[in-house]
Amino acid sequence: MLTERFSEFSVALESDAPARNATTTTAAIVPRPQLSIMSLSAPPSAASSPKHQPDMARRRSSAALPIFMQPMPTTILYDVKNVQGMRDIKTDIGYARAWVRLALERKLLAKHLKQLLTDHDLTRTLYKRYAFLRCPEEREQFLFHLLSLNAVDFTCFTNGFPNAMLTYRVVIFAGRRASPATTANPYICLGGSIGHTNHIQIPKGCTEHVFQHKNLGQLSTIRIGHDNAGMSPKWMVDNVVVRNEAAGHLYKFACGRWLGRGVDDGSCERLLVGEQLPSHIDIEDLVASCRNPPSRSQSPASPRKTAEPRLSIPAVQEMMGDAVNNIVKYYYKPEKERGTLTVLLCGEKGLVSSLELVFLCGYKSARMFRQHFFIWDFLERVNASFSSQLKEQFGDAHVSSRKTALHSFCNLVNRINRASRQLGKDGKFQLLVCVGARDHMLHQWLPLIAESPVTDSMYEESSFFHDAGLVTFLVQILQSLTEFHIILEPSLVKGIGS
């Protein structure tokens, strides 16, 4: 029956093809609008005058554009159109199977089949009188069992068609406390469980962008940045929302930081870790939350507010233990149940944010950093001290292993500084932690950092690094990660390679 319905839908779609082809563009492959942006409009007289059009373009790019997100359509026709756009499927049976997977993933299979089965003329044409689907009681029981599948989150469509070309819609919520426009040329890079994109250029002043790309799978990261060009390149980004226009998955990437030289930590590019939102989320609530800066970003771009009350040392120890234990449990799960490691490394309460609290504990901020402390400043001074030590000659095996650890730290810091010119200081720290965890070097670096004369001058006696027992705790808990083969997403190690 599904193949018959696909044939009928194909005829219906082909009948209005000339009208659709006349208005179709590469930026809108699916029925629109799905995420519409209401631009500020000029009075009719100004809009109709050519000489006012450049002024209107400037006004639209510099003003805060109200963003209105509409729910995904839930019609059979919408899903059929998306499935028929998959060029790697060749048969009606293949289209029908893809449609079932898509409807199942969108939790619409029971609804769609109920609509199809209420077409009594169709069922009488295709099925004999004694058929299962011709019996009202059996049909209702069948649909009831299908409805129970809505309690499960399936990814059979997203993960089942890696070569499918899908449409993605990106909405950027720029900060309202400053001008949301930037004179620079912004770009994004998306990463997921199946693949990642190259740089995708975003038009200036545009807060919504639609593009097609080979299936990325379940999204995990977005890298957003700009080239720092123009008179006013700095750009405040609160949140970014990405939607898979086929499966309807919504992802929220929290930022709440500036992008640009000479502001915040000087970063022109930030890597944000995504949170997949539940399918039943209220769109109005989502828009309202995205219009406000996040209180604590689930990303390496989270703000470092030194004025906030610091956690106690036992609380930091507990966070470190939870972060490492979550990674250990990740590797003991079956591979299909693991999810994404990036969230455990770079997300809220992940390894990066936990180690950040370790480094923030006990530093002499008021006297040395004027309330603006960036861990990377401290690590660069440690790097200079280690470089001086490497010039000495080492003899026995114990000292030789120490030299290896010093050399690996200095080499990585220098590589990050050379290759990651767009990243700010916080982004560089995040990269150092991720690569250190992958290379099983974190537990070797921390004792050396604690012994450095730079640490004596920049940290108080109450810090983690001045307590031998706390340093031993860090070494032991981080050493438990050495038994796992950690593979980082390409988006995390951009520019420095393997």
Image (cartoon, helix red, strand yellow):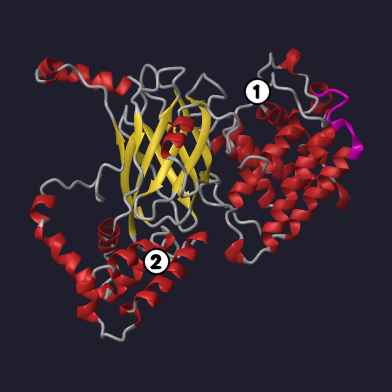
Q: Read off the magenta span.
A: 459-469
Residue 146 position in % (x across, y down): 44, 68
Please name whichever residue, 135 or 205, is drawn nearer the observer in this view of the structure.
135
Q: Please tell me whether residue 420 belongs to the stretch shown in magenta.
A: no
Residue at (76, 38) in percent of width and height: 390
**Quadrant of image for the N terminus:** bottom left
Residue at (74, 54) in percent of width and height: 481
Identify the image quadrant of residue 339: bottom right
Which residue carries the number 1 mark? 305
Closer to viewer: mark 1 or mark 2: 2
Residue 332 position in % (x across, y down): 70, 63
Residue 453 position in % (x across, y down): 83, 27
Identify the image quadrant of residue 474: top right
Please name whichever residue, 288 or 18, is drawn nearer the observer in this view of the structure.
288
User: Of marks 1 and 2, which one's residue comes earlier in the chain?
Assistant: 2
Residue 498 position in % (x across, y down): 57, 52
Task: Name the mark on residue 101.
Answer: 2
Please name whichever residue, 418 or 375, is drawn nearer the observer in this view of the structure.
375
Q: Is residue 173 above or below residue 323?
A: above
Q: Is residue 444 above or below residue 173?
A: below
User: Dot 2: what SS?
Assistant: helix
Q: Is residue 9 above or below residue 469?
A: below
